[in-house]
Image (tube, rainbow, N blue to C red):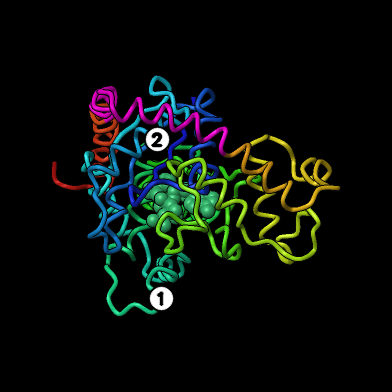
Amino acid sequence: MKRMLTGLQPTGVITLGNYIGAIKQMVKYQDEYESFLFVADLHAITVPNSNINLKENTRSLIALYLACGIDPKKNTIFVQSQNEYHANLSWILECNTYFGELSRMHQFKEKSKGKENFTAGLFTYPVLMASDIIIYDADYVPVGIDQKQHVEIARDIAIRFNKKYGDTFIIPEPIISETGTKIMDLIDPTKKMSKSSENQNGVIRLLDEPETIRKKIMRATTDSEMLVKFDEENKPGISNLINIYSSFTGKTVSEVEEQFKDSNYGTFKKAVADVVVSELEKIQIKYNEYINGTEIDQILKEGREKTRMYAKAKYDAVKRKIGFYE
Ligand code: ATP
Ligand code: LTN
């Protein structure tokens, strides 16, 4: 059975973008592939995070995974920092990665821009991500388009290692959803909707109150044309709402355009709000059950044991290939 793996950082309550870009994909394919889903807490410390409660956010993220429909019987769920082999392998991979290729990463450029002090961890972040993926021989990695470049460098690193030391790693491929490639900020639809965004009105979080979600959608920036038509360049706000509606209803973009061809923006936005609120309300009810229950501890215990065993076997194989003293 092919393997699929992804991780999200515990940097805050996840957004509609994270849900559509990563989690919904995991739910969709969990019957088809052997699945691994983790909390990327080691990645969360690459930027200053003094106002983040890692413990609380980690538990909350796991409860959200489960509430969103991730089935713990079909997925191995774990916390990255509970498995030291990721960081161990990452060092070895760093020694097989070029400074030049890491310098070209969009996320690094964006997150370091204008800053005097950024960490070496922010720079080597994609290598740890490569390690997360290839240590489990994952075939597929569901991510939003912003992470595509990171999956590509993971491929390059795996290919390079295999060439140098002999076949060791599976070469992973990204899975990017058609409609949810990049959900944009509702206020500034030229910017990615991001967990760490400063303007809360542009971001829908999975645990926002239903009324707040409605308000945010009704106030989303659009244009003056009054035509529900997909045109990312000239109508980024409406195109973003079309993408959201499409991924919540399973309708294609042209079906959505057809459905709302005679509607004004108010009617369209209300329809978007209805589908989003209806799905998120169900998630919130389940979230409250999981966060107040004890299931999470058992799930993480099992996830930790299983992934440490898998990861150790791969790490030991890598050490042997390189020729370290045994
Ligand atoms: P941060 O603001 O802390 O950088 P983030 O919101 O970008 O966080 P991540 O934890 O970095 O979220 O990403 C988790 C997953 O969600 C990744 O697969 C990423 O590609 C996906 N993702 C993040 N934002 C979006 C978005 N706006 N649209 C689609 N997918 C997204
Ligand atoms: N970099 C990702 C989180 C992440 C990840 C991974 C995703 C860390 N390791 C491995 C997929 C596979 C992010 O922040 N979006």
Q: Position of residue 245 (x, y in %)?
A: 66, 43
Relative to 322, residue 232 above or below: below
First of labels 2, 1 by sequence position = 2
Q: Amino acid at mark 2?
A: Leu
In the rendered structure, the answer to whether residue 320 lies left or right of residue 151 reads left
Q: Main secondary structure of the magenta part?
A: helix
Identify the image quadrant of residue 308. top left
| Position in image of residue 123 (x %, y %) | 34, 66
Image mark for residue 311: none
Q: Give how far apart the Cα atoms at labels 2 and 1 are.
A: 32 Å
**Quarter holding residue 225:** bottom right
Which residue is disc 2 drawn over? 64
Q: Secondary structure at mark 2?
A: helix
- Quadrant hosting residue 62: top left
For image coordinates 42% across by 54% down, the residue present is 195
Span highlighted in magenta in the image: 277-303
Q: Position of residue 159 (x, y in %)?
A: 45, 50
Give the vertical position of 201 relative to 111 (above or below): above
Residue 157 appears in the figure: no
Q: Is residue 97 above or below residue 164?
A: below
Bin the neighbour count of mark 1 within 10 Å (Cα to Cα): few under 14, some 14-19, many 20 and up.
few
Against 5, residue 234 (above or below) is: below
In depth, the one of 149 and 297 nearer the eye is 297
Q: Residue furthest top?
A: 73
Q: Are marks 2 and 1 in contact (CB under 8 Å)?
A: no
**Mark 2 vs mark 1: in front:** 2
The residue wearing badge 1 is 113
Quarter that holds the C terminus? top left
Front residue of 42/20: it is 20
Q: Is residue 289 magenta?
A: yes
| Residue 66 in magenta stretch | no
Number of labelled discs? 2
